[in-house]
Amino acid sequence: MVSMAPRNVIMQTDKEPSATDGMVVESDSLPSAEVAEPSKRRPVQIVWRNVIVMTLLHLGAVYALILVPQSHPLTWLWTFLYYLFAALGITAGTHRLWAHKSYKARAPLRALLALMNAAACQNDILDWSRDHRVHHKYSETDADPHNAKRGFFFAHVGWLLVRKHPDVMEKGKGLDFSDLYADQIVMFQRRFYFPLMCLMCFVVPTVIPWYFWGESLWNAYFLAAILRYCVGLNATWSVNSFAHLWGTRPYDKRINPAENLSVALSAVGEGFHNYHHTFPSDYATSEYGWYLNITTVFINCMYYLGQAYDMKTTPARVVDMRKQRTGDGSTWKVQ
């Protein structure tokens, strides 16, 4: 097993924390909510505004590909780097820090992650984390915002194009989100989310190439803002779709989430999804530490800079025992 985790991490055991902790270290039970028969589900209510916005966004991203040959090479590099910047706002910030509380971060890092989250434009920290906790508690049921049992398209993007199932709201009321409401940075970002999102997702990535190396505002906007944003969305969505439908399940064969290396690459480390749903409080979301996991590398770097601490990890013996008990027998060796 490859590991570059800091030495002074909190080593978690297979003992579950209290209900107020929101997430458990080792999830050994299947979702409690029942899946409704398609005929019993309420009629789908399409949100046409979202359909139009997503259609225009993807058309803009396709158009941006035409601009690549005529844009500056530094714009290509900037687009990629800003993609990582925004992606880490979701993976290291909204997902591992706020949704799962898998590590703690000091105020400067939390403020930076709040800006990085705004650059990703996937809703504010509170909304994203709230939906994600409900997703883990009621995975693959009607209470799951992006229930993969409703098909690939629904899990990938369709869930954003229709009204949420009533169970999402109803079951979500039973979960504890007090830690999110108590975080002043989370609430500040929520209050000023729209201007922060416009600035970080569209203005900053467009202006930098124009100001520093003379890229046209047109090229910079479509490449560093539109294309980068669209690819980032689909990378995040792929965790809900591809990684919930295809891959191996070495930790728990009874659940949909799977290990998908393609998703791990595109979503900067979030493709080890069978592990993550089995051990949701592990800050690395993988037993392989930093390997194919840029997010874990980032958190480790923040630890050495004194900004991240109390990272939760799962002991190897617990992982191995779980593999033997509920895994599908698949193995993957890190060379």
Image: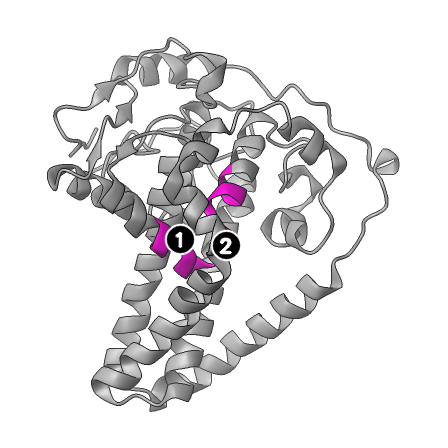
Magenta residues? Answer: 114-129
Q: Tell me which residue sits at (63%, 32%) in the image.
A: 140
Residue at disc 1, secondary structure: helix
Tell me, yes or no, if residue 148 can be seen here: yes
- The answer to whether marks 2 and 1 mark residues whose Cβ atoms lie closer than 8 Å is yes
Residue 251 location in percent, x, y?
Answer: 42, 23
Residue 195 location in percent, x, y?
Answer: 46, 64
Q: Tell me which residue sits at (57%, 24%) in the image.
A: 175
Give amino acid for label 1.
Asn
Residue 154 location in percent, x, y?
Answer: 67, 49
Residue 150 location in percent, x, y?
Answer: 70, 42
Q: Residues within 10 Å of mark 1 (few under 14, many from 20)?
A: many
In this figure, which residue is indicated by the disc labeled 1?
117
Q: Is residue 220 above or below residue 24?
A: below
In this figure, which residue is indicated by the disc labeled 2?
122
N-terminal-most mark, 2 or 1: 1
Q: Tell me which residue sits at (56%, 26%) in the image.
A: 137
Residue at disc 2, secondary structure: loop
